Every structure is written in structure tokens, then in C-alpha cells.
């Protein structure tokens, strides 16, 4: 497999992981800013994460193993790389064909094209124009070139990739061009947001996914931190690592946070992310919240935490019963836990919404 293809595979795989991790904050922002999280938002999130990883893979990978590399210097003369382009006879087809096969021209063109998406993302996500895109393009390019010049910040004794001032200029130009081109298709002024008042199935499913992500990501981070402290600070041998404290951190802490969120606030972390809250239809509110915890997120965390070959199939059945059957069939997509607890769900509208509300389609 070629280095270019391997870089693309790494960028796509790691970018997808980053997109999943970023779903929590992105969903929280979008549901409060626009009242919804659409397919286009998810595609922008995925493509942005993959692009960010592509900048890393194509500018720093493959990283050499050990001392098996050649030290390179720095190219600090402006336009020196571009002077190597053989322009030939551009008026003929043969001249144009020779140009597009010229190594120096391809290097210049690819350095420009590599940063064109950055200008588009700046306008699409941050809703900023040419100045911000140019400054950000220069900053990102300078970070990359400096990383190359320092041997990945002195991880290596010398640089294995060339620092080129022309790359810095061309990358910045690419970000500027990306912003200018995107201005044709993207309006900087956001259209007036019409807030939905009806909870959709998609909103409920995103909330459930966010609950799972919160428990798994927080638990994994705590587990890794615990192991790092035990291995490198306390210096406990790997085979002697205690498992009980680690499992309590991994599943107990996220479980306690979810339980506190339900019992005290009436909604899970995922429901907070998608900006919905519960309303009691009958009975005491504390009892209803306890039933919701016992029927909803509680069993999910227990099944994730308990080791055993049987927990996986049971968890899948539980998710299927909740997501595929109970949520679509219960009024307002309440789901199994809310139906059992006698709770309704409603969207939390910001004060800025005013009269700009309508039922969601």
C-alpha cells in the first residue's frame, strides 16, 4: 500500500473517531443555536474531522522508525520552489500536458489545494470571512512547518521533513481562495431560525447515542488515567494492577453522574445535550424520576459494566426494545422509561426563540 493511500486510510479512520467524540459538544451547540441537528451538520462534522486528520497525515506521516531517516535543511528563500516550474509553451496542448506533469508545479498546486477546504470550513462552521480564513491558514501552516523544522518538536534529533517558506505562503493562499470561493455558495448571515416544538425521533435517538458516548468516553478516560497513575507514578507492575478500583471509576463515576442528572434534574446527560426536559403527568416527581432511572439509563450502564458473554446480547435487546420499538410507538417519542414513569418530554426553548416556533416536520 502506498504512503498516500495509507495516509488517506489513517485520516479517514481517525477522523471518524474524532467526529464521534465531538458529537456531544456539536449536538449541544446545534440544538441550542438552530433547534436541530441535521444530516448536513453531521456530514460537516465528519468531513471536518477527516480533513483535520488529513492535514496531519499528509504533512507528518510516515514518521521514521528509529534513526532510519535523512536529516533535511530548510528552504527560506521566498518563491525559490516556484522558480523550478517549467512553464514551457502553455499555448499548446503538449505544453499544458507537460506542466501538469511537472513535479514542481504539482507540489505548488497541491500545497494550495490542501488548504482550500480550510477556508470553506471557516466560512461554513465559524461563519467568518477572508481575513479570518487567511490568518487561520497562516497559523495552521506555520504550526505544521515549525513541527517539521523541529523534528516533531525534538522528538527526532533533526528534521525529516523540509521546512519550506513557499509552502507557508501557498498554504495561506489556499485558505484565502477557499474562503473566496465558498462565499459564492455560503451566506455569512444566518437565516432566521424557526424553532421546532415537536420532538422528533431523530432528536430522541441522538440523545440516546449521546448518553452512551458520555458513559463510554468518560469511563474510558478515567480508566486510562487510573492506569497511567498506577503504572508510571505509583510504579505498580502491569500484572498487579487492581481491577476493582478501575471498574468503579470506569462505570461508577459516569453512572453516578447520570443518576444524579435524572434524580435531581429529571433528564439524562444525553437529553440535556439535545435540549429536552421531562414533565410529570401523574404521581410524585421523585418517584417518577426513580422509575425513569430504573427502566432507562440505569440498566444500560449496568449491562455495560457487568462482565460476561451474555451481557452483550441482552444490551442489544434492551436498546432494540427502547430505540426501535418503544420510542417510535409512544406518544411524543417518550420511550419506554418515560411511559413507565408517567413523564412527558418537551423541548427547552431559549429565551431568544420568541415567537419563532413551529411544529417540527
Image (tube, rainbow, N blue to C red):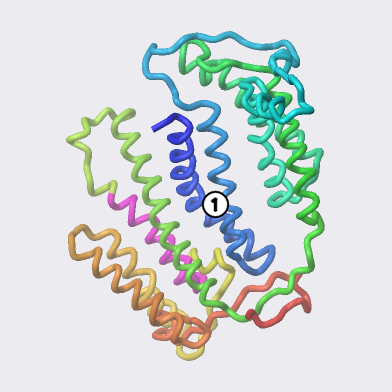
Front one among 15 and 241: 15
**Which residue, as the protein is rendered here, is positioned at the far bottom?**
282
Q: Which percent across, then down, holds residue 140?
A: 65, 31
Q: Residues within 10 Å of mark 1 (few under 14, many from 20)?
A: many
The secondary structure that most of the magenta stretch takes on is helix
Q: Which percent across, then down, holds residue 62?
A: 45, 25
Task: State the residue position of label 1.
Answer: 46
Question: In the picture, which quadrant includes the N terminus?
Answer: top left
Q: Would residue 359 be counted in the magenta stretch?
A: no
Front one among 11 and 153: 11
Residue at 37% in and 15% down: 66
Considering only vertical position in the picture, is 208 above or below 155?
below
Residue at 24% in and 31% down: 236
Left or right: 284 as drawn, with respect to 360 = left
Considering only vertical position in the picture, is 89 above or below 224?
above
* Span colored in magenta: 247-268
Place residue 283 in its image quadrant: bottom left
Place residue 28 in its image quadrant: bottom right
SS assignment at label 1: helix
Considering only vertical position in the picture, is 188 above or below 145?
below
Q: Would residue 264 be counted in the magenta stretch?
A: yes
Left or right: 295 as drawn, with respect to 310 = right
Question: In the picture, which quadrant includes the C terminus?
Answer: bottom right
Residue at 24% in and 67% down: 313
Q: Which percent across, then down, holds residue 317?
A: 29, 73
Residue at 66% in and 24% down: 98
Considering only vertical position in the picture, is 88 above or below 73?
below
Amino acid at each position: 500500500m502506498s504512503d498516500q493511500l495509507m495516509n488517506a486510510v489513517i485520516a479517514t479512520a481517525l477522523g471518524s473517531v474524532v467526529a464521534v467524540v465531538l458529537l456531544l459538544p456539536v449536538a449541544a451547540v446545534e440544538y441550542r443555536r438552530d433547534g436541530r441537528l441535521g444530516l448536513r451538520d453531521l456530514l460537516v462534522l465528519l468531513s471536518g474531522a477527516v480533513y483535520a486528520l488529513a492535514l496531519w497525515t499528509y504533512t507528518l506521516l510516515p514518521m521514521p522508525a528509529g534513526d532510519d531517516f535523512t536529516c533535511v535543511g530548510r528552504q527560506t528563500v521566498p518563491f525559490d520552489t516556484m522558480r523550478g516550474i517549467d512553464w514551457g509553451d502553455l499555448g499548446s496542448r503538449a505544453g499544458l500536458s507537460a506542466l501538469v506533469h511537472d513535479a514542481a508545479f504539482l507540489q505548488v498546486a497541491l500545497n494550495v489545494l490542501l488548504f482550500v477546504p480550510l477556508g470553506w470550513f471557516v466560512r461554513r462552521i465559524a461563519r467568518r470571512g477572508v481575513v479570518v480564513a487567511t490568518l487561520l491558514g497562516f497559523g495552521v501552516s506555520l504550526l505544521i512547518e515549525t513541527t517539521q523544522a523541529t523534528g516533531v518538536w525534538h522528538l527526532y534529533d533533526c528534521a525529516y521533513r523540509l521546512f519550506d517558506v513557499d509552502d507557508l505562503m501557498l498554504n495561506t493562499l489556499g485558505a484565502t481562495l477557499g474562503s473566496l470561493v465558498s462565499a459564492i455558495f455560503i451566506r455569512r448571515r444566518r437565516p432566521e431560525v424557526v424553532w421546532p416544538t415537536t420532538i422528533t425521533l431523530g432528536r430522541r435517538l441522538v440523545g440516546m447515542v449521546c448518553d452512551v458516548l458520555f458513559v463510554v468516553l468518560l469511563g474510558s478516560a478515567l480508566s486510562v488515567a487510573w492506569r497511567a497513575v498506577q503504572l508510571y507514578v505509583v510504579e505498580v507492575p502491569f500484572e498487579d494492577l487492581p481491577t476493582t478500583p478501575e471498574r468503579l471509576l470506569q462505570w461508577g463515576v459516569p453512572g453516578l453522574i447520570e443518576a444524579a442528572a435524572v434524580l435531581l434534574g429529571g433528564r439524562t446527560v444525553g437529553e440535556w445535550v439535545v435540549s429536552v426536559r421531562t414533565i410529570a403527568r401523574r404521581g410524585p416527581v421523585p418517584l417518577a424520576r426513580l422509575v425513569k432511572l430504573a427502566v432507562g439509563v440505569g440498566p444500560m450502564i449496568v449491562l455495560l459494566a457487568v462482565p460476561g458473554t451474555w451481557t452483550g446480547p441482552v444490551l442489544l435487546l434492551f436498546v432494540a426494545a427502547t430505540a426501535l420499538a418503544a420510542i417510535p410507538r409512544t406518544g411524543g417519542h417518550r420511550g419506554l422509561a418515560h411511559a413507565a414513569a408517567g413523564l412527558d418530554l418537551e423541548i427547552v426553548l431559549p429565551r431568544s426563540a420568541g415567537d419563532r416556533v413551529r411544529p417540527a416536520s
